[in-house]
Image (cartoon, rainbow, N blue to C red):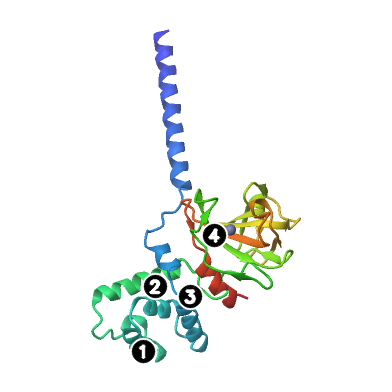
């Protein structure tokens, strides 16, 4: 009797251990990717004028990578950047650039910025689509007070005519669909890049969308409206970007660039 019960005890412990290992493995495999703290401050505080300037140079000299151009221009002064860009224009490889008197610490920052631009290609021409297909106007209102300071505005409002078509900015999967109190008719897409893209206050949601199904960049999400807490405001799309760690970031600089640089 004692032998049997100790065998059962052993069995229970073994099953428990296996279960624990399975839970830990699942957690490790499903944890959100860590985002280094310098990534989004760098990307979202970028001057959109500078981004467009670099994309223009790249368009006329396609052999110069836009990531190198932007990393150099956004890190160094114009006086320091110009000779480097000139060398790139003359087909000098990045690894062979003559950095002159620029200290190696600055060179390291340029390289880090290049790495961020390569890994998070928000400014890459034609990578992301602009969400409003029609006339729209918008400004940077990220962080503005809402409901008398109870909460902050966690996105960008793009104003336009009711019914203006709204499209998905990227490929991904439909994660949220339908009504919520603040967003009204809203669609949430988990982009293939891991971020959550939020389209709110829609007048109508595209009828073919199904929760859990794929959506491609440029596919219809619905049409612009003023549903949810926007019921008394002019028609607009509230567009938000939430990182996998739950942080909402400012979409404004990306939208400014996508408006002119997406298909
Ligand atoms: Zn809004």
Determine whether 118 is above or below 85 in the image.
above
Q: Nearer the viewer, mark 3 or mark 2?
A: 3
Q: Is mark 4 within 8 Å of ligand 1?
A: yes
Task: Mark 3 or mark 4: name the one nearer the start of the chain.
Answer: 3
Name the spot of residue 36 as percent of width and height, x first: 38, 59
Disc 2 marks which residue?
Answer: 114
Q: How many C-alpha atoms fall within 10 Å of the one at disc 2: few (<14), some, or many (≥20)?
A: some
Of the residues tagged 1 and 4, which is closer to the observer? 4
Q: Nearer the viewer, residue 81 or 115?
A: 81
Mark positioned earlier in the residue sequence (1 or 4): 1
Secondary element type, mark 4: loop
Q: Name the spot of residue 125 as percent of width and height, x first.
A: 54, 76
Closer to us: 187 or 108: 187
Q: Which residue is mark 1?
A: 87
Disc 1 from disc 4: Cα separation: 39 Å
Residue placed under numbered mark 3 in the picture: 48
Q: Which residue is mark 4?
A: 155
> Is the distance from the Cβ of mark 3 to the nearest ligand 1 atom less than 8 Å?
no
Measuring 25% from the left and 86% from the top, which residue is drawn there? Answer: 100
Which residue appears at 71% of the width and 67% of the height? Answer: 161
Number of the front mark, 1 or 3:
3
> Is ligand 1 closer than 8 angstroms to the Cβ of mark 2?
no
Q: Residue at x 41, y 24 (%)?
A: 13
């Amino acid at each position: 009797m004692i032998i049997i019960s100790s065998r059962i005890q052993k069995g229970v412990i073994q099953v428990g251990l296996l279960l624990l290992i399975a839970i830990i493995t699942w957690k490790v495999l499903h944890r959100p990717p860590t985002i280094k703290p310098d990534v989004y401050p760098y990307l979202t505080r970028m001057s959109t004028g500078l981004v467009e300037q670099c994309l223009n140079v790249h368009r006329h000299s396609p052999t110069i990578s836009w990531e190198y151009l932007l990393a150099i221009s956004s890190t160094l002064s114009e006086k320091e950047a110009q000779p480097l860009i000139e060398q790139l224009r003359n087909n000098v490889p990045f690894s062979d650039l003559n950095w002159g008197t620029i200290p190696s610490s600055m060179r390291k920052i340029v390289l880090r910025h290049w790495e961020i631009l390569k890994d998070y290609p928000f400014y890459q021409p034609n990578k992301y689509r602009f969400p409003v297909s029609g006339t729209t106007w918008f400004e940077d209102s990220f962080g503005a007070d809402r409901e008398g300071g109870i909460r902050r505005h966690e996105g960008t409002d793009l104003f336009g005519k009711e019914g203006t078509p709204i499209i998905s900015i990227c490929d991904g999967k439909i994660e949220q669909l339908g009504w919520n109190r603040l967003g009204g008719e809203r669609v949430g897409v988990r982009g293939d890049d891991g971020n959550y893209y939020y389209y709110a206050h829609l007048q109508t949601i595209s009828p073919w969308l199904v929760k859990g199904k794929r959506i491609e960049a440029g596919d219809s999400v619905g049409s612009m409206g003023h549903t949810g807490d926007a019921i008394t405001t002019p028609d607009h799309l509230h567009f938000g970007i939430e990182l996998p760690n739950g942080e909402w970031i400012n979409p404004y600089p990306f939208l400014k660039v996508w408006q002119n640089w997406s298909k």
